Image: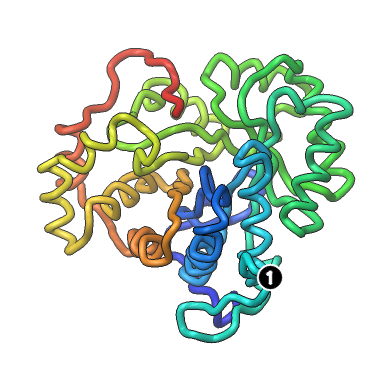
Amino acid sequence: MSDFVTTQRHTVTLANGDRVPALGQGTWYLGDSRATHDREALALRAGVRAGMTLIDTAEMYGNGRSERLICDALDGTSVAGGQLRDEDGSLAKTLDREELFIVSKVLPSNAGRPDIFESCDNTLDNLGVDYLDLYLLHWMGPVPLAETVACMEELVAEGKIRAWGVSNLDTDEMEELWRVPGGSNCQVNQVLYHPASRGIEYDLLPWMRDHDVALMAYCPLAQAGTLRGRLFDSPELAEVARRHNATIPQVVLAWDIRGGDTIAIPRSSRPEHTLENAAADRIELTDEDLALISRAFPAPSYKMPLDME
């Protein structure tokens, strides 16, 4: 890493050997407003500087606007076309692509021939990069998994993506994927996960661990969910936060990444909130902490459908 970027303590190693920070950055709903463009770009840059070098996006997010925001953040370009200034007041420099791990997602309707190749090219153009580190199928759709996997493998061979994965697939769908030629090359499954949404722990997460598929947790702070109040009004989480001189969001993120195989991608539109998220990397929850959180938010005892927001 350059002097500009801090290395996080908590990392996740994917099945292909890539090591990524356990805390990354999501961009759902970012890039939609010119009025907040520069602040959001600076938030992403602050996250990279704090070691949150994995950035997740999707062609669906704002019809490409989130991808273009990331491009501007990497280049340090303001909405008016000039250069941004980082939090230290210096003119923003272009970030080193090799220090970043960029993830995007293809819509299910575009996940077959020939649309996936056009979608990938459009995503690369929007981001201003030559390749993606990881390309995900956003959710199951009308295109057969065998066709999507074959296309993903072609994109890998062409050097446009380095690896691929899926999002919002439940256990039966992951089992179907594994029956497809090349399906076991899937690196991650991105699903909703946080203390108030633990349904995947019943069978999906154990299956993923058995098959060396990393979990990428979206909405890890329940930003877009109906359960946010339960988390942030929890006296148990408040007590754990007090013990660690931390905030409840930091404790939730520390809980999300506690297992060593989960990447959490909180979204933030403000540099100060991004840095608060990044500081969760320093928290090590104790067995007592985890037991208290589990009493408030118990693991499931039966199969539950995937939560999606």
- The quarter in which the C terminus is drawn is top left
Q: To which quarter of the image does residue 274 belong?
A: bottom left
Of the residues shown, which amino acid type is indicated by label 1? Gly
Q: To which quarter of the image does residue 292 belong?
A: top left
Q: Nearer the viewer, residue 253 or 258?
A: 253
Q: To which quarter of the image does residue 244 belong?
A: bottom left
| Relative vertical location of residue 97 with respect to residue 291 in this rendering, above or below | below
Q: Nearer the viewer, residue 117 or 29?
A: 29
Q: How is the image coloured?
A: rainbow
Give how far across and how far down residue 146 sits, in percent.
78, 20
- The quarter in which the N terminus is drawn is bottom right
| Relative vertical location of residue 10 with respect to residue 108 in this rendering, above or below | below
Q: Position of 24 compared to 98: left or right?
A: left
Tell me which residue sits at (35%, 47%) in the image: 258
| Relative vertical location of residue 149 with respect to residue 236 in this rendering, above or below | above
Residue annotated with mark 1: 81
Q: Position of 219 compared to 35: left or right?
A: left
Give how far across and how far down residue 238 sits, in percent.
14, 49
Tell me which residue sits at (60%, 46%) in the image: 57
Q: How many marks?
A: 1
Q: Position of 103 compared to 13: left or right?
A: right
Tell me which residue sits at (45%, 55%) in the image: 23
Give how far across and how far down residue 78 sits, in percent.
62, 69
Give how far across and how far down residue 5 sits, in percent.
53, 74
Q: Nearer the viewer, residue 218 or 289?
A: 218
- Helix, strand or loop under label 1: loop
Q: Position of 79 compared to 201: left or right?
A: right
Tell me which residue sits at (64%, 20%) in the image: 140
